[in-house]
Image (spheres, rainbow, N blue to C red):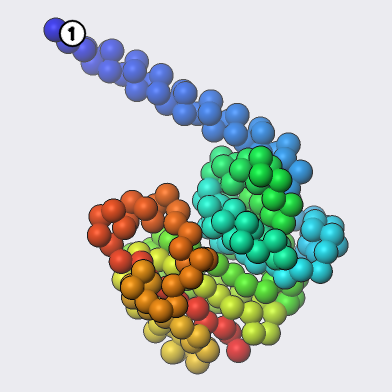
Amino acid sequence: MVFLTIGHIFAQNKYRHNLSRNKKLARFAEFSTFPNTYEKSEGLKSNWQTKVFNNNSPIVLELAAGKAEYTVGMSRLFPNKNFVAIDKKGNRLWVGAKKTQEEKLVNTAFARTQIDFLTDWFGPAEVDEIWIIHPDPQIDKARKRLTGPMFIARYREILKPGGVIHLKTDSTLLYEYTLEIIAEQKLKLISHHADIYNAELYNDVLAIKTYYEQMFTAKGETIKYISFTLD
């Protein structure tokens, strides 16, 4: 029988930490080399169609994208749309960026930035749709919720008239909060359901499951969905 001392345990934890850190650093380095990744906004605002995608197709954002599983999934379904995944962590975005390079999905881009700076990256009426997939519900910080008034104001600056915002979440709190915000601000509610996998509005896009959603559904959580416009 092998007994580990505190020193052994500390050494193992340090080794795992270093492996994880080295993996992140390697991903950061490779992320910067991909032709469809961006870490600075200079020259991009109001120029995404001409400078990035070289077409006039609609632009769709995935916010707090993580590994950008939705961006990858939607880009496969809609080759006639342009998709931009946004997240502050490059090692996460690397996963989606790597996948799109391997699959040659030319209608994708990945921007490493905080959502607070959206208006530095996109011009007025430049964006057609926004998808918010399983964001942090910010249980104790309502002002930081991505469907709250502070972010709604930013979305107004970049969305086209009639541009649709989509929320997909496992959080009942965020689902109900978002419906309250839509009512308070007199926004246009398009559709909503507290259990999309048992709803008529279920479709190929809503069928895309992120890693976390697979975890949620395995635990029996229901997945909620809301779509609305700011008009």
Instruction: List x then y, in percent, for residue 197.
Output: 36, 69
Answer yes or no: is residue 108 visible: yes
Q: Residue placed farthest to the bottom in the image?
A: 186
Q: Residue placed farthest to the left in the image?
A: 1
Q: Residue at x 58, y 30 (%)?
A: 25
Instruction: List x then y, in percent, for residue 222.
Output: 30, 66
Q: Residue at x 48, y 70 (%)?
A: 203
Instruction: List x then y, in percent, for residue 135.
Output: 44, 61
Quarter of the figure that contains the C terminus:
bottom right
Q: Nearer the viewer, residue 73 or 159?
A: 73
Q: Is residue 93 above or below residue 217?
A: above
Q: Quadrant of residue 219?
A: bottom left
Q: Find numbered disc 1 in the image and state the secondary structure of the residue it sits on.
A: loop
Q: Quadrant of residue 223?
A: bottom left
Q: Nearer the viewer, residue 63 or 199?
A: 199
Q: Residue at x 78, y 62 (%)?
A: 48
Answer yes or no: is residue 90 visible: no
Instruction: List x then y, in percent, for residue 119.
Output: 69, 67
Q: Is residue 99 above or below residue 116?
A: above
Left or right of residue 144, residue 4 in this image: left
Q: Residue at x 53, y 48 (%)?
A: 67
Q: Amino acid at mark 1?
A: Val
Quarter of the figure that contains the N terminus:
top left
Left or right of residue 1, residue 164 in this image: right
Left or right of residue 29, residue 172 in this image: left
Q: Which residue is mark 1?
A: 2
